[in-house]
Image (cartoon, grey):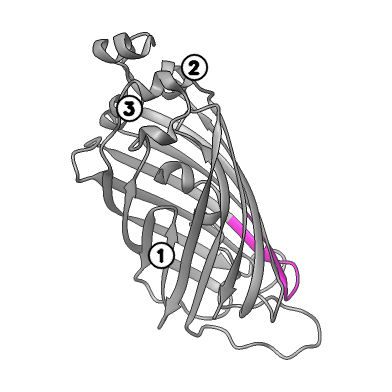
Amino acid sequence: MCVILSAVLFSFPLAAPAFAQDTNSPAEPAPPAPEIGGDSLSVAVGVASVPSYEGSDSNRFLAVGVVRGSLSGINFSTRGTRLLVDVVPDKPGPGFDFQLGPVAGVNLDRTSLKSIKDTRVAALGERKTAVELGGYIGIGKTGVITSDYDKLTASVSYVHDVNNAHKSYLITPQIEYGTPLSRKAYVGVSANAVYAGGGYARTYFSVDAPGSLASTLPTYSAGKGWKSYSLTGLATYSLTGDLTHGLAVIAGVSYSRLLGDFAESPVTRIAGDRNQLLFGAGIGYTF
C-alpha cells in the first residue's frame, strides 16, 4: 500500500533521498568538476519487506521500483504508488531550492485479502482502492555541511481520496538530509509524520458491529489525528561510473510507529503491532 511503501527505501523517499544521487556529483579534491544541472533519468528495481497491512505484525516481500528524473530543471519521482512533480525549475550548484507541485497516487492497503496474513483482519473485508490527489510544497538547501552537494530539505504534502474509498485526507510534514561520501557513495536519512483525517481512521482502523462479529475483534471507533511517525535511512554505492551515471546498488531500512487511535485500534493492538519495520535492497541505473 502507498502509505507503507512510501516509507521504505524504494519510495523514499521517497521527498526522501532517491535511489541515486541527483544530477550533482560529490566533491573530491583535485578532479575536474563534473557537469551538473542537466537532464537525467534514474530507474531502480528491487525487493522490499513490508507489513501485510498497515498495523500488521507480519511482513511480506514485494517487488518494487522507482523512477526519478529531471527534465529542463523540472524534477519528477515515484514514491511507492505515488508520483510527484516539482514544477519549480532547479538551478545548478549550491543554494536554495523551492519545491511546489502535484501529487497523484493510489492507496492499496487491504485491497486484497490474499495479502493479509491475519485472518481476523482479513475477515473485516477488502477495502476499495483509494485514489489520492493533492500537492506538496517545500524548500531545500544544497551545500549545507559536508560539501557543495549535500542537501537538507523540509516539505509538507496533502492528498485527498477522490475515489470514495476512505473519502479523507493525509497531511505529511517531512525533513530529509542526504550527502555524497565520495563520487560513488551516498547516504540519506529522513523523518516524517502523518496526520490522517477521520474517514481514513474509520476505513482502516475502526471495527463496526458486523466486522466485530465476523472477526472476533472488539468494536472500535477511531478518530482523526496524528497517525504515525517514520525514520528512514538508505545507502547507495555506484558499481560503474559515479553517482551521476551508471549502475548502483541500494539498501535501506525504515521504522514507523503508529500513534493514538491508530495504535489503540484492535487492528493494531490485538491483531498487529504499532511498531512497523521495513527494509529493502535493489539495483538502479542512472542515464
| Majority secondary structure of magenta residues | strand
Task: Tell me if I can see residue 13 in this picture.
Answer: no
Residue shown at 61%/57% (left/top)? 177
**Can you tell which of label 1 and label 2 is closer to the viewer?**
2
Indicate the quadrant where residue 250 lies. bottom right
Above/below status of 223 relative to 257: above
Indicate the position of residue 137 as horizontal and vertical percent values.
37, 58
User: Whole-Å distance between the Cαs marked 3 and 1?
Assistant: 29 Å
Above/below status of 50 relative to 30: above
Above/below status of 257 relative to 45: above
Q: Is residue 80 magenta?
A: no
The residue lying furthest to the front in this view is 114
In the drawing, what numbered circle is on residue 286? none
* CB under 8 Å between discs 1 and 2: no
Indicate the quadrant where residue 138 lies. bottom left
Indicate the position of residue 229 as horizontal and vertical percent values.
51, 36
Residue segment shown in magenta: 177-188
* CB under 8 Å between discs 3 and 2: no
Three-letter code, disc 2:
Arg
Task: Tell me if I can see residue 84 in this picture.
Answer: yes
